[in-house]
Image (cartoon, grey):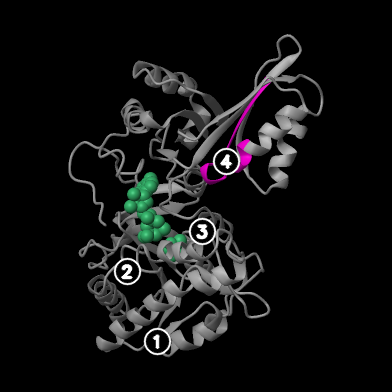
Amino acid sequence: MALIVQKYGGTSMGTPERILNVARRVKRWHDHGHQVVVVVSAMSGETNRLLGLAKAITESPDPRELDQMVSTGEQVTIAMLAMALKSLGVSARSCTGGQVGIRTDKSYTKARIQSIDADGMHRDLNNGMVLIVAGFQGVDEDGNITTLGRGGSDTTGVALAAALKATECQIYTDVDGVYTTDPRVAPKASKLDRITFEEMLEMASLGSKVLQIRSVEFAGKYQVPLRVLSSFDEGQDGAFDAHWQQTTGTLITTELDSTMEQPIISGIAFNRDEAKLTVLGVPDQPGVALSLLAPISDANIEVDMIVQNVAEDGTTDFTFTVNRSEFKKALSILQETGKAINAREVSGSDSIVKVSIVGVGMRSHAGVATRMFRSLAKENINIQMISTSEIKISVVIDENYLELAVRSLHTEFELDRESGESSVHG
Ligand code: ADP
Ligand code: ASP
Ligand code: MG
């Protein structure tokens, strides 16, 4: 008997019919004698709808009230799934984050989980009950509802799995695993059977939204076995045979089997949510980066890539990227600073994307960057910025070339699937 935490995303919970399907799957696991905790998201589109309603009231809603509101989507789906399970004769109970003791700090809209009351849940599970927990939410020490950031139900799932010492945390979604890149952009993307936490964390940080970044961090830190798999594939978990755990979905793991040949590149990530800002002709003197970036961080705007050019004639150029939603704000701050420090020109673009190749295999292979740049040059794609780390290379390019860039890099690094259909739903 295993204790399994299963998380179902918005598309998987998107209609009453799909919720009944989820209930049938949960019942199968329960019937096989496993203890099951289910974490659910709101129905797809619901969280966006709620955020839209808040914005219709005011441009900057009070964060406490916003969390009170957007957390309600999950309260609907927990109850629907509990009803569905009961109708199938399974003993089940829906619980809000607060009801299972998910305590967070007070950072509304991006709260961090501090503790979870595992004992209470173990008691119910030992009594044969299936627990259905609202993802994405917790309560602070004063009982205020908090939310964990977009995509936060993944983190609820992993955190519960860590607290309950579950055998595995299964993230059921609308694709049947983690692919070499988003299969919606590159139809030749292939499913990975395994990927390391380190690579998955890079992929998530660089824009692959299949898992929330924090859930991967959490799973790595607490060594939670994490698997991504499809809620639409009927046969996928039906067999419960000895090979199930080797073959289903994608397992996120600490180490890959050292006897297997490692690919140089495991995946390609991209981020459409960035914008670029440039200051030309700033005096090349100590403290200039600080004077440009301090007002940006004082305004709570996060900076991602930063590039400073080699100085010429006593001046230098400076380019950095921010989240696209902060572009206008960042540009107007930079125009002010630019004037104050006598910069020649301030400009920006919010029609760029960041494309990154990721792989631990890069550590032991030379010439990966050259291959990447050659492949982009062949397609006539201009690189605007470059940044590298030990296991990734990122470039900023014009957004119109995103698909071409991802597909040509996918082919260049031999990631293309031989044949067969990919499994994308929703
Ligand atoms: P859920 O609602 O179940 O949480 P998400 O939309 O958050 O689902 O995540 C699943 C989606 O992530 C897929 O539909 C796919 O388009 C996208 N995605 C992006 N990168 C990848 C990748 N490398 N592998 C698989 N899916 C990816
Ligand atoms: N419903 C929340 C969102 O859309 C949380 C989640 O789905 O993980 O971001
Ligand atoms: Mg998600």
Q: Nearer the viewer, residue 158 or 343?
A: 343
The quarter of the rendered structure image containing the N terminus is bottom left
The quarter of the rendered structure image containing the C terminus is bottom left
The span from disc 4 to disc 2 (Cα, nearest Å) is 36 Å
Let me know if residue 328 appears in the view: yes
Let me know if residue 389 appears in the view: no
Q: Tell me the element at label 3.
A: helix
Mark 4 vs mark 2, foreground winner is: 4
Q: According to the image, label 2 marks what residue?
A: 13
Callout 1 crowding tier (Cα within 10 Å): few <14, some 14–19, many ≥20: some
Q: Amino acid at mark 1?
A: Met
The span from disc 1 to disc 3 (Cα, nearest Å) is 25 Å
- Residue at 67% from the left image edge and 32% from the top image edge: 335
Q: Earlier in the sequence, mark 1 or mark 2?
A: 2
| Boundaries of the magenta span | 317-331
Which x, y percent locates residue 196? 47, 47
- Residue at 56% from the left image edge and 83% from the top image edge: 119
Which x, y percent locates residue 187? 25, 40
Q: Is residue 340 left or right of residue 303?
A: right
The span from disc 2 to disc 3 (Cα, nearest Å) is 20 Å
Queried whether the magenta region covers residue 319, the answer comes back as yes
Q: Mark 4 and mark 3 in contact (Cβ < 8 Å)?
A: no
Mark 1 vs mark 3, foreground winner is: 3
Q: Earlier in the sequence, mark 1 or mark 3?
A: 1
Q: Is residue 175 above or below residue 306?
A: below
Q: According to the image, label 3 marks what residue?
A: 215
Mark number displayed over residue 328: 4
Q: Amino acid at mark 4?
A: Lys
Q: According to the image, label 1 marks what residue?
A: 129
Q: Amino acid at mark 2?
A: Met
